[in-house]
Image: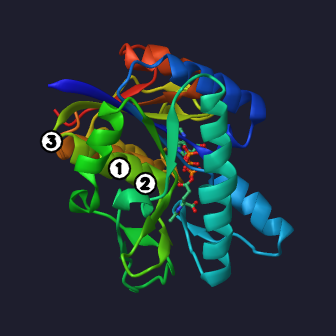
Amino acid sequence: MKELTIVKVGGKVIDDHEALASFLDAFTDVPSPKILVHGGGKVASDFGERLGITPKLIDGRRITDAPTLELVIMVYGGLVNKNIVAQLQARSENAIGLTGADANVMSAVKRPVSQVDYGFVGDVTKEDVGVSTLSKLIEAELTPVFCPLTHDKQGNLLNTNADTIASILGVAMAENYRVNLIYCFEQNGVLEDFGKKIVIKVLYRDRYDKLKSEGTIHAGMIPKLDNAFNALEGGVHQVKIGSFQSLKALLLGELGTKITIN
Ligand SMILES: Nc1ncnc2c1ncn2[C@@H]1O[C@H](COP(=O)(O)OP(=O)(O)O)[C@@H](O)[C@H]1O
Ligand SMILES: CC(=O)N[C@@H](CCC(=O)OP(=O)(O)O)C(=O)O
């Protein structure tokens, strides 16, 4: 089976010009085929504050009312996605920026209202991924760059967590490729001691559950790890979480946190 590398880069890296540039240098060196998924939550929150839109997040998931949806479409689909694509082109990486609506690469269902109304947030399954279109793009030596927007096939874009997009993409593409999924962010991995910055080398689900209940793993790390375990259970070959500065080492199996279900 051919290998496919899917890399997700988080919002705090994207918000830092130098950090993003050094991450994109390293991403350019990753052998093809590859797909980049970017977040941008911090940029959206900061931009929103300038427009008088106060960010509301529950467990790392944004409540997306109508003004917030307009905001994230502009920020994720425009500002962040197109800047990353242009910066990859400057590195001779033939990137193509995508929302889920483009070539129908990822559709979604608006999350039903339960205890919380998340608003215009899209839930995705592997059946919602345009595997054949994506396979054609990567076989044509293009590098897809996903922003965290999906569509409902009725003309509406929806906000979908970027970690979830990376995980579902991995599961869907695992039918045709041996997928390595790497989550890059500003820490060196999943930390067992936040103060001392001690990185957990291998994280099993029972340890995750324990650290979560103790509060050592919290906030945005919870959906990230849920997505990481879901990816492995769905057939992704390897999932690693680590620093944007260590992409090469993470790919080689060094540094960061390896997520495992065995
Ligand atoms: N045990 C932990 N190890 C590392 N990061 C953690 C941990 N618990 C909570 N976090 C927080 O989770 C954040 C990552 O989640 P999130 O902000 O959603 O990431 P991203 O920027 O990649 O989207 C980190 O910035 C960190 O503050
Ligand atoms: C529904 C939902 O929560 N969407 C996320 C999408 C961006 C994202 O995931 O960005 P990071 O990777 O930088 O966190 C949000 O709007 O914050």
Q: Which mark is residue 175?
A: 3
Badge 1 amino acid? Asn
Badge 2 amino acid? Pro
Badge 3 amino acid? Glu
- Identify the mark nearer the N-term, 3 or 2: 3
- SS of the residue at dot 1? helix
Question: At 45% from the left edge and 79% from the top edge, which residue is drawn?
Answer: 155
Residue marked by disc 1: 227
Residue 142: x and y in percent read 42, 34
Q: Is mark 1 within 8 Å of ligand 1?
A: no
Ligand 1's quadrant is: top right
Residue 124 visible to the viewer: yes
Task: Classify 10 Å Cα crowding around label 2: few (below 14), some (14-19), many (20 and above).
Answer: some
Quadrant of the image containing the C terminus: top left
Residue marked by disc 2: 223
Residue 79: x and y in percent read 70, 53
